[in-house]
Amino acid sequence: MLGIGLALAASLSWGLSDYLGGVKSRVVPLLTLIAVSQLAGLALIAVITGATSSFPNGRTAAYAAIAGAAGVVAVAAFYRGMAIGRISIVAPISATGAIIPVVAGLARGERPGSLALLGMALAFVGVVLASAERSPAETGASRQASRWRLRRPSASASSSFSWPRRARATTRLRPRSCCA
C-alpha cells in the first residue's frame, strides 16, 4: 500500500511540475527555467540526504549523475515542446517514456496483473488519441510542420524521462529513515 501511495504522490508532483514548467516555458527563457527548477531539486535532495544520512556510494552516485543529465535533457525537450505547441499533445506523448521501465521490469521477470495490463493498453490508446488532436484552423502544410515541431521535443523528452526512473530502479538506493 505504501508503494501505491508513493506512486500517487510522485504522479501528483510530476504532473504539477510538468504543468507549471510548461506554462512558464512560454514566458520565461528555457535556460532560466531549467536552471531554477534543477537547482531547486538539487537543494531539496541535499536537505533530504543530509537529514536521512543516506549518502550514495560511488556507483550509485555515477548512476544518479547520468540520470540527472538525462533528466535535464528531458526537461529541456519537454518544456520546449510545451512552449511551441499544445500542452494537451506534448504531455501525453512525453509520458510514453514510461514504457522503458515497464519493459525493463518485464525483462527482469515481473508480471503485471490483468488489470494493470488493461490500464497500460488504455493509456496507450489515450496517448494515441490525444496526440492526434487537430484544431479546425490547421491546414495540411501547417499541420505537418506543427506535428514535426512537436514530435521531436516530445519524443526526446519521452525517452529521457525514463532513463532517470530506470537508473533509480536499478541502483536500489532507498532512504533509511524516510518512508521505511
Image (cartoon, rainbow, N blue to C red):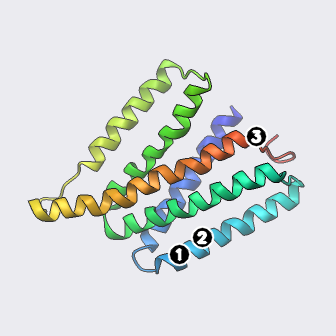
Quadrant for residue 138, please give it: bottom left
Residue 179 image offset from top left, x and y in percent? 79, 43
> What is the secondary structure assignment of the residue under circle 3?
loop
Label 3 sits on residue: 172
Locate residue 27 relative to residue 178 in the image: left or right. Answer: left
Residue 54 image offset from top left, x and y in percent? 86, 52
Q: Earlier in the sequence, mark 1 or mark 3?
A: 1
Residue type of the residue flagged with mark 2: Ser
Q: Which residue sits at x=24%, y=58%?
A: 147
Residue type of the residue flagged with mark 1: Leu
Q: Which residue sits at x=46%, y=73%?
A: 24
Label 1 sits on residue: 33
Q: Which residue sits at x=61%, y=41%?
A: 7
Residue type of the residue flagged with mark 3: Arg
CB-based contact (under 8 Å), mark 1 and mark 3:
no
Q: Quadrant of the N terminus?
A: top right
Q: Earlier in the sequence, mark 3 or mark 2?
A: 2
Label 2 sits on residue: 37
Q: Toward the viewer: 15 or 143?
A: 143
Residue 144 image offset from top left, x and y in percent? 17, 59
CB-based contact (under 8 Å), mark 1 and mark 2:
yes
3D distance between C-alphas at marks 1 and 2: 6 Å
Q: Which residue sits at x=44%, y=61%?
A: 78
54 shown above or below 87: above
